[in-house]
Image (cartoon, rainbow, N blue to C red):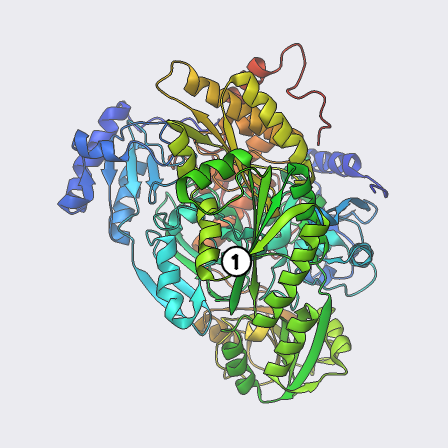
Amino acid sequence: MDTAATRPPDSETAADALAAVVAALRDELPGDALITAEAERRAYECDGLSAYRQVPGAVALPRTRDQLLACLRLCREHGVPLIPRGAGTGLSGGALPSATGLLLSMARFNRILEIDSANRCAVVQPGVRNLAISEAAAPQGLYYAPDPSSQIACSIGGNVAENAGGVHCLKYGLTVHNVTGLELVTLDGEIIRLGGKTLDTPGLDLLALMVGSEGMLGIVTEVTVRLLPRAERTQVLMARFDEVEAAGRAVAGIIAAGLIPAGLEMMDNAAIRAAEAFVHADYPVDAAAILLCELDGTNAEVSEDVMVVRRKLLELGATEVRTARDDAERARFWAGRKAAFPAAGRISPDYYCMDGTIPRHQLGTVLQRINTLSTEHGLGVCNVFHAGDGNLHPLILYDANQPGQLETAETFGQQILELCVAVGGTVTGEHGVGVEKLDGMCAQFAAPELEQFHRLRRAFDPLGLLNPGKAIPTLARCAEFSRQHIHGGELPHPDLPRF
Amino acid sequence: MNTGNDQSSRLAERIRVAATTGQRLAIVGGGSQRGLAFPAGFDADVQPLEVASHHGIVHLAPSELVVTVRAGTPVVELQAALEEVGMMLPFEPAQPTPSSSVGGMVALGLSGARRPWTASLRDAVLGTRIVNGRGEILRFGGEVMKNVAGFDVSRLMAGSLGGLGVLLEVSFKLLPAPAYQAWLRQEMTAAAFIEQARDWGRSALPFSGLAWADGVCHIRLGGGQEGVQEAAERLGGEPDREGPAFWTRLRDRHLPFLTRSLPAGDRLWRLSLPPATAPLDLPGEWLLNWAGGERWLRSSAAPDAVRAAATEAGGHARLWSGDPAGAPWLHPRPAALLRLEGEVRAALDPDGVFFAPLLPPYPQPARRSA
């Protein structure tokens, strides 16, 4: 009933079924579009979440829609799972291969089909890199707003699958707000177009359902994205706080003043120190927290807003506010934030990046608990926070070569996610569920809701062959999860109000 | 907060009974826009399911930019509560009558004049509590800005025309209401407006509305005072003294263009097009919104001709009022897409409890595996 892969039509075993698909694909795909050698398959064994690895049974790299349709048809006929993959930068194991499945890399669907400056949109193939869209649109003074930190490498198809975000979401939205059209192919081989260059679509909004569906509903073959005009001027302020709670209050204060900054980021002391040691962004290393606030618009708007924000920050407890004097300093302020993940990698052999979202007013409580858990588990943690939209990225520091530390880091991470749910938030703000947060989904959703997700999935893919085992846990898994997690009828964090 | 009246259990029970007895229900909110979801009224066997009594604001948190509201709450009541705290819904919904409900607004999924610059209705939906066709109360999304856990059923509910389930509660992202606004007017033709809007669209000025009616381009700006005043100087044109009234009437679809009776054989259409599309060669009068992306047409043209022109331009046309003459109200879609929409509908409402004549019919049960 759940997502278990369906049996092949006859008595073929899973491995035989894949072998049959591969044999038939040799006639359908050019030689370089099918990878079967073990050493080459290994390059695809994980995505950006390298703790989970599995060498794929085979890899297909179609370049045309007909080649893609052949992959779908053969997998359908033989009951072989298909695991779509973009650039492989995902952080939740959404592209984790299957040993008896076909990994479907969309990397060769890499053409920018159109930059339509009059309608301020771009039509691209899914393998196009996120940043390449902005680069192609730059001569027209336009850009694509969502900017996940992997934007140099990540593909727009992967962004659609995960509903990727970035540091400018509060003002400019996530992927779902910036995609107006998709072409997709269903497992049945039907080519479906949703939306286009218009600002709404007739009928059910399947476009909204597709974005963030983690490759389980269809294979995206074309994406139409909105482009925005570059702001005339951008300015960044950096505020220093001696207590984290004050920084949280300042975020609420800026918004209460009627401003939606283009970016509003917070880093705690551990993150500040790590980043400073790595890129020398000129951060105050003894601050409890810093806020980076980016304002954009016309010259007049930015001048006005900078004054308001500066006043608010000082009023609400900032002990120092610096305004970037020039583009170089602005770039330096951001460099520290953008390098936070690799900076953590520099002070610790391994780190585990979490992705919970919380109501902002819970920030103080949540950070305090994370610190308590950090002490309990004996693992350090740095916190970077998309403060404007409540998206918290604790980076748990561990050493995979020390026995037991990976498991401890995972337990710690799971506890952070349960904490996010308990305060009214979610287990994933922008990285997706993949294989990583299946247990978190059990904490967030009740059985009828999960069952509803499975029904929706079957509406698109009745055979359950597209990316099976990801994103939506089976009810059996959740039953097992709750047996392990509810001790004596006690939920985790019993003292917190439930939502 | 959390005043009002919670009817969740009653509504869920009613649907469970309907599902087991084969009863069909038409979800009705304030009733003010019933014709947009049920243009030919209800079939004889359909009972209305009244949601208006399920009302009240559950949670309003301006500093979190979020409100959660029961679906029966009148839009005017919600807007008044938001205004009091300096907030607004980013998509500027219509409130055609005082009874128009939040649930009806979401089920229709229509966005107002701010759409090109801030958000569509569905963009602003953060979470929902619904009753599906099996009578199960389900919660999707939440009250946080970023949430990618599970399929985005909340946004799927926007524009679902009552065919997927009963909305119980909806959480919306809010935006601060602009501190300062300015209204300008410039006389120009529709063709000039489309070109002008295209050029203005390449600069990041603080627009909150660009419309054209009766030979006049109406400009609305919103934001900080200095930014708005400077933008107004750059754009030029004369102050639009009728501006506030014009934009309110446009929002609530009360402009005479949209309300005056149609000559026999004429129809009122709402077209959604790539905004820079040159004026379409169709007879009739136009009203343009969304910087050219939304176009209203009063025309004697045959439905097929309007649809063909919209399709050719990469857009779609909804028949808003007038004789349907056998033409579908929504823009026709390819068979494969209709089949998929039907499957999605069946996934939420397997027994067909909800009466939704504008949605595609259910697919043949053969393909359904559960």
Q: Is residue B173 visible?
A: no
User: Percent x, y for residue A267?
Assistant: 55, 40
Which residue was labeled with disc 1?
A324
Work out whether residue A194 or residue B274 is closer to the camera in this orientation and state it.
Answer: B274
User: Percent x, y for residue A180?
Assistant: 49, 59
Q: Is residue A7 left or right of residue B256?
A: left
Under mark 1, the amino acid is: Ala
Q: Is residue A156 visible?
A: yes
Quarter assignment of residue B7: top right
Work out whether residue A104 or residue B116 is closer to the camera in this orientation and state it.
Answer: B116
Q: Quadrant of the C terminus of chain A?
A: top right
Quarter assignment of residue A498: top right
User: Percent x, y for residue A317?
Assistant: 70, 45
Subunit bearing disc 1: A
For the residue labelled by badge 1, is the local secondary structure a helix, a strand or a loop? loop
User: How many labels, in total?
Assistant: 1
Going 25% across and 53% down the picture, which residue do you hit? A64
Work out whether residue B301 or residue A399 is closer to the camera in this orientation and state it.
Answer: A399
Going 65% across and 46% down the picture, which residue do you hit? A319
**Image height check: is B329 above or below A340?**
below
Q: Is residue A65 left or right of residue A367?
A: left
Quarter assignment of residue B258: bottom right
Going 60% across and 33% down the picture, which residue do you hit? A449
Q: Is residue A126 left or right of residue A319?
A: left
